[in-house]
């Protein structure tokens, strides 16, 4: 069984790629999908990418993390797909643990793991027991770097919604939640494992829900995607509750949630 690690990078982030790569190993390949906005960033591509036969680089002029992930998925050829960013550090024992899980569970389409910070702390408040994923988690959100999939289960079937995520100007996060919703609708066999596979420096964008307009618009848009017209009432109650508890002012929060709903009503993914 083989694994493609899909690494998405943007502009200056490409200089960190060497820190993501582990020593070469049979059956493990890296696909680097590099987005840039100016030709001058091409000069920053490190030599390690050019020298290693287990690393393939694809360059695209543009931006948008969801689009970058989709481009990487399209290029994959291995049995399993694992996602990474240019600030992700893969733990040395990760590949053995991932391979063991998928080899012993042929019915499994998607596995979710945990991530930590560089200082060794859990990135989120994760469940401590294994469990089947049959709905979106209530107490924490899914991050792409925690996901490993069978390629045949998602390639050409489930994409990241390019209206959402880093690099967009309106819906600046939420691409993982939409992806998970589509995986649930496709009835994929998914399971969570309390095993740490990666470490990262990334701050969770969704933690800015009370202060960031883009995050608030993304919340409204995602709620509409999942709940349809009920999103108006759900978001209204969320804005009211948040204001009553002193986390934000009601009107700005409600306005941005509503903008996200309206945006989803007039656009297609």
Image: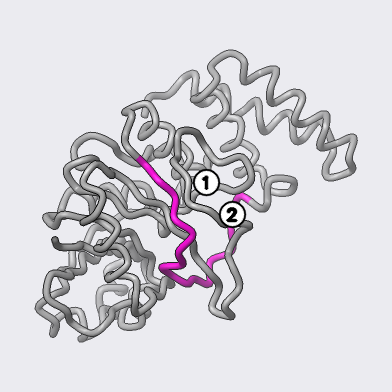
Marks 1 & 2, CB-CB < 8 Å contact:
yes
Task: Spot the residue most to the front.
Answer: 104
The answer to whether 87 is drawn above or below residue 170 in the figure is below
In the rendered structure, the answer to whether residue 27 lies left or right of residue 235 reads left
Residue 173 marker: 1
The spot of residue 53 in percent (x, y) is 9, 78
Pick the front one: 96 or 200: 96
The boundaries of the magenta stretch are 190-206
What residue appears at the point 41 percent right and 68 percent down from the top-left corner? 197
The answer to whether 44 is drawn above or below residue 85 in the figure is below
Pick the front one: 82 or 67: 82
Mark 1 Cα within 10 Å, few/some/many (few <14, many 20+)? many
Which circle's residue, 1 or 2, is located before the other in the chain? 1
The spot of residue 189 in percent (x, y) is 32, 38
Residue 55 marker: none
Determine if the magenta segment contains residue 204: yes
Q: Quadrant of residue 18?
A: bottom left
The spot of residue 222 in percent (x, y) is 53, 31
Residue behind mark 2: 205
What residue appears at the point 73 percent right and 49 percent down from the top-left corner? 211
In the rendered structure, the answer to whether residue 197 lies left or right of residue 36 reads right
In the rendered structure, the answer to whether residue 187 lies left or right of residue 267 reads left
Q: Label 1 vs label 2: CA separation?
A: 7 Å
What residue appears at the point 53 percent right and 53 percent down from the top-left corner? 129
The spot of residue 30 in percent (x, y) is 21, 69
């Amino acid at each position: 069984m083989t694994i493609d690690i899909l690494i998405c990078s943007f502009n200056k982030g490409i200089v960190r790629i060497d820190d993501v790569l582990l020593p070469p190993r049979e059956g493990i390949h890296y696909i680097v999908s590099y987005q840039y906005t100016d030709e001058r960033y091409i000069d920053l591509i490190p030599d390690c990418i050019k020298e290693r036969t287990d690393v393939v680089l694809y360059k695209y002029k543009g931006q948008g993390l969801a689009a970058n992930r989709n481009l990487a998925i399209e290029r994959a050829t291995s049995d399993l797909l694992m996602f990474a960013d240019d600030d992700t550090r893969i733990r040395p024992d990760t590949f053995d643990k991932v391979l063991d899980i998928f080899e012993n569970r042929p019915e499994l389409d998607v596995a979710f793991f945990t991530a930590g910070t560089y200082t060794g702390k859990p990135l989120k408040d994760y469940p401590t027991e294994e469990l089947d994923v049959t709905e979106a988690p209530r107490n924490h959100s899914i991050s792409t770097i925690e996901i490993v999939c069978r390629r045949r289960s998602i390639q050409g079937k489930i994409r990241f919604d390019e209206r959402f995520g880093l690099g967009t100007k309106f819906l600046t996060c939420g691409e993982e939640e939409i992806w998970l919703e589509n995986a649930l609708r496709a009835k994929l066999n998914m399971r969570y494992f309390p095993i740490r596979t990666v470490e990262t420096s990334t701050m969770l964008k969704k933690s800015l829900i009370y202060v960031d307009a883009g995050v608030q618009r993304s919340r409204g848009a995602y709620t509409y995607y999942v709940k349809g017209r009920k999103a108006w009432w759900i978001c209204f109650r969320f804005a009211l509750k948040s204001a009553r508890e002193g986390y934000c002012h009601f009107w700005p929060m409600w306005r941005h949630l509503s903008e996200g709903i309206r945006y989803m009503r007039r656009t297609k993914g």
